[in-house]
Image: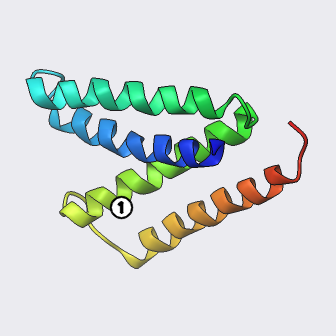
Amino acid sequence: MAWLVLIVSGMLEAVWATAMSQSNGFSRLWPSIVFVIGVVLSMGGLAIALKSIPVGTGYAVWVGVGAVTTAAWAMARGAEPVSTLKIVFLAGIIVCIVGLQLVSSGEAH
């Protein structure tokens, strides 16, 4: 369950990162509100997941999931150009995230 919470929390990074970019320096109300809610839920989920996942692994996965989700969302919206190399490197991050999960599942916490 902690891994699911961690993955969802990482995906919520895309919510608050996107809202922050749309808030125009926190001068727009609704994107600013979405940012605050997103960051609280994202970090709250990270804190819950870190009760049973080592901090180094948990933080690396949280950041990786957030980075991949944010970049994929930006490319899907047309806010960022899509390229084959970007997709390859984002897939590499996903492979590393899966690897961290596989390695840590065999470790004692």
| Front in this rendered view, residue 97 or 37 | 37
Mark 1: few/some/many CA within 10 Å (<14, 14-19, 20+): some
Instruction: Tell me what residue is drawn at x 38 percent, y 28 percent.
Output: 39
Asked whether 52 or 12 is in front, the reply is 52
Location of the N terminus by quadrant is: top right
Which quadrant of the figure has residue 86? bottom left
Q: Residue furthest front?
A: 1
Q: Residue at x 41, y 30 (%)?
A: 41
Q: Quadrant of the C terminus?
A: top right
Badge 1 is on which residue? 72
Residue shown at 71% from the left, 42% from the top: 57
Secondary structure beneath dot 1 equals helix
- Name which residue lies at 72% across and 36% down: 56
Q: Position of residue 82 (x, y in %)?
A: 31, 71
Residue at the limit of the structure toward the left, as seen here:
28
- Give the colour scheme shown: rainbow
Q: Is residue 71 above or below residue 60?
A: below
Disc 1 residue type?
Answer: Ala
How far across and down, in percent of the image, does residue 61 sit? 61, 47
Q: Is residue 16 left or right of residue 99?
A: left
Q: Position of 1 compared to 63: left or right? A: right
